[in-house]
Image (cartoon, rainbow, N blue to C red):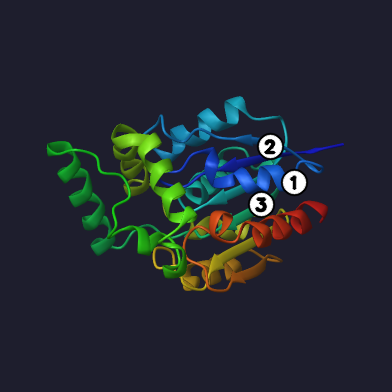
């Protein structure tokens, strides 16, 4: 019997983020990828996702998806059987990061959406993958998601609650994972989540940036397979 697995994408990401894992785990997982492009709060994202999800499911989330995962654990913890938190943070933005987001939103409102620029791409993926298929796929994915969704997602991220106080309430089997070269949610953020969730395990991807599911798909799939098998 296949395990229902709900995948939550990150900012400017769609189902392509999890394409390799969906293919690799087809023998053990019944996948669903949430659409996190339609709402401007993590509460609304979580509610919409829960309305479409199976009664009980395993939950895998990356980056912004992790913020929504924490909200799902607040709204309906009884529906989640296990949790995978990849390249995310339980803490809200600091003042500098929030200011960067607001500046990006303001510039988009008076200009054209340019997606993931050449300047931003090295912050998302390891430098060794910027020139090549991974970089091209990331940029194409962001273009598909588009500027309107970007504004909604950034608003949701800016207004998300602090999830650190609720880490101790998470009682399902949990893995926490991060790239050793993640510049957006550095390893310290994942280490803090791991420390806050009793019994969780921590995995560090080597030579990897912010998108392990795409940068190291085989390793990510193997990690999730072990997680699903418990």
Depth check, front residue: 163 or 93: 93
Circle 1 — which element? Answer: loop
The residue positioned 51% from the left and 73% from the top of the image is 180
**For residue 51, side relative to residue 174 (left or right):** left
Give coordinates of residue 7: x percent, y percent: 60, 42
Tell me if mark 1 has few (under 14), some (14-19) or many (20+) residues whose alpha carbon lies within 10 angstroms of its own.
some
Give coordinates of residue 17: x percent, y percent: 53, 46
Q: Quadrant of the N terminus?
A: top right
The residue positioned 50% from the left and 72% from the top of the image is 187
For the residues marked 2 and 1, what is the alpha-carbon distance in whole angstroms? 9 Å
**Residue that numbered label 1 is attached to:** 25
The residue positioned 59% from the left and 61% from the top of the image is 216
Of tags 2 and 1, the one toward the viewer is 1
**Residue that numbered label 3 is attached to:** 83
Residue 79: name its quadrant: top right
Depth check, front residue: 129 or 174: 129
Above/below status of 79 relative to 60: above
Tell me if mark 2 has few (under 14), some (14-19) or many (20+) residues whose alpha carbon lies within 10 angstroms of its own.
many
The residue positioned 66% from the left and 52% from the top of the image is 83
Q: Quadrant of the C terminus?
A: bottom right
Circle 3 — which element? Answer: strand
Residue 183's label in the rendered image is none
Of tags 1 and 3, the one toward the viewer is 1
Residue at the limit of the structure toward the top, as seen here: 51
**Residue that numbered label 2 is attached to:** 31
Disc 2 to disc 1: CB gap under 8 Å: yes
């Amino acid at each position: 019997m296949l395990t229902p697995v709900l995948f939550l994408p990150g900012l400017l990401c769609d189902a392509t983020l999890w394409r390799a894992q969906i293919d690799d785990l087809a023998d053990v997982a019944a996948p669903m990828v949430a659409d996190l492009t339609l709402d401007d709060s993590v509460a609304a994202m979580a509610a919409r996702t829960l309305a479409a999800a199976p009664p009980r499911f395993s939950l895998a989330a990356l980056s912004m998806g992790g913020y929504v995962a924490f909200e799902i654990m607040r709204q309906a913890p009884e529906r989640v059987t296990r949790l995978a938190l990849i390249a995310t943070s339980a803490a809200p933005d600091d003042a500098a990061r929030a200011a960067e987001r607001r500046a990006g939103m303001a510039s988009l409102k008076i200009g054209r959406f340019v997606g993931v620029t050449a300047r931003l791409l090295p912050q998302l993926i390891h430098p060794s993958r910027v020139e090549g298929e991974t970089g091209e796929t990331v940029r194409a994915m962001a273009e598909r998601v588009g500027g309107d969704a970007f504004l909604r997602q950034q608003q949701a991220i800016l207004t998300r609650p602090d999830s650190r106080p609720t880490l101790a309430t998470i009682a399902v089997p949990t893995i926490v994972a991060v790239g050793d070269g993640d510049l957006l949610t550095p390893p310290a953020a994942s280490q803090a989540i791991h420390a806050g969730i009793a019994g969780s395990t921590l995995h560090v991807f080597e030579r990897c940036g912010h998108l392990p599911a795409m940068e190291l798909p085989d390793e990510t799939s193997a990690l999730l397979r072990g997680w699903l098998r418990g």
